[in-house]
Image (tube, helix red, strand yellow):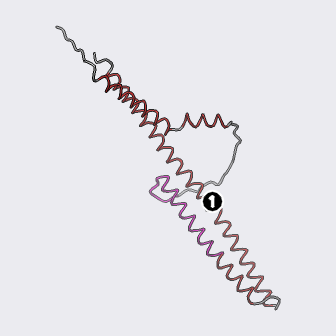
């Protein structure tokens, strides 16, 4: 009889296992978060590219208008030059937006762990639904479900059981045998 030393060691090992499981869950949640962030960054980059494309289109129209007004003598050459500069800036922003889309696609591909190219299209759907929850319920749910907190609590239990096992080391061990 070892006064519960073995039992405390077993409980410490079980609590350490729970802690590792919670750490695994934390890592899984981190990967999911990275994929979601990459997805939304790609959607944002695509929308910004659409805005840049529209800006280039509008800048081209403004340049045509400025050139037409200059040709009939209603505007100075400066207006045409300013419209050309604005178009050039819009085209630069468009190239930057295209580059951002390419970077966002690669970031999503890496977050998904794909070796090959991202050979599927991303759906741009922001359907929302309403959820009713109070602040107290949200806080309680967050404390109950956070894997980091569960890991820390399991580590604490493991340490307490290890302490109990070490304290019981000072107690005598009784052994008997018979034949």
Q: Please give left or right for residue 54 compared with residue 15 in the image.
A: right
Per the image, is 103 magenta? yes
Q: Residues within 10 Å of mark 1 (few under 14, many from 20)?
A: some
Res 80 → quadrant: bottom right
**x, y percentage for residue 170?**
27, 22
**x, y percentage for residue 34?**
52, 51
At horizontal 49% and vertical 52% (from top left) the residue drawn is 112
At horizontal 56% and vertical 53% (from top left) the residue drawn is 37
Kindly state the secondary structure of the residue where label 1 is placed: helix
Q: Quadrant of the N terminus?
A: top left
What span is colored magenta in the figure?
90-118
Q: Please give left or right for residue 169 compared with residue 60 in the image.
A: left
Res 4 → quadrant: top left
Q: Please give left or right for residue 28 compared with residue 91 in the image.
A: left
At horizontal 36% and vertical 30% (from top left) the residue drawn is 13
Per the image, is 135 magenta? no
Q: Which residue is mark 1?
A: 44
């Amino acid at each position: 009889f070892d006064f519960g030393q073995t039992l405390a060691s077993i409980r410490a090992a079980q609590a350490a296992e729970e802690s590792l499981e919670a750490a695994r869950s934390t890592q899984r949640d981190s990967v999911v978060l990275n994929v979601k962030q990459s997805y939304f960054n790609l959607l944002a980059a695509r929308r910004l590219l659409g805005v840049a494309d529209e800006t280039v289109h509008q800048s081209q129209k403004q340049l045509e208008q400025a050139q037409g007004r200059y040709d009939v003598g209603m505007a100075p050459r400066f207006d045409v030059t300013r419209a050309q500069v604005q178009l050039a800036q819009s085209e630069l922003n468009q190239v930057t937006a295209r580059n951002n889309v390419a970077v966002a696609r690669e970031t999503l591909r890496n977050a998904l762990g794909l070796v090959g190219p991202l050979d599927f299209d991303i759906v741009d759907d922001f359907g929302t639904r309403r959820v009713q929850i109070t602040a107290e319920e949200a806080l309680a749910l967050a404390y109950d479900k956070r894997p980091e907190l569960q890991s820390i609590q399991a580590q604490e239990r493991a340490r307490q059981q290890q302490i109990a096992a070490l304290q019981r080391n000072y107690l005598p061990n009784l052994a008997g045998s018979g034949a």
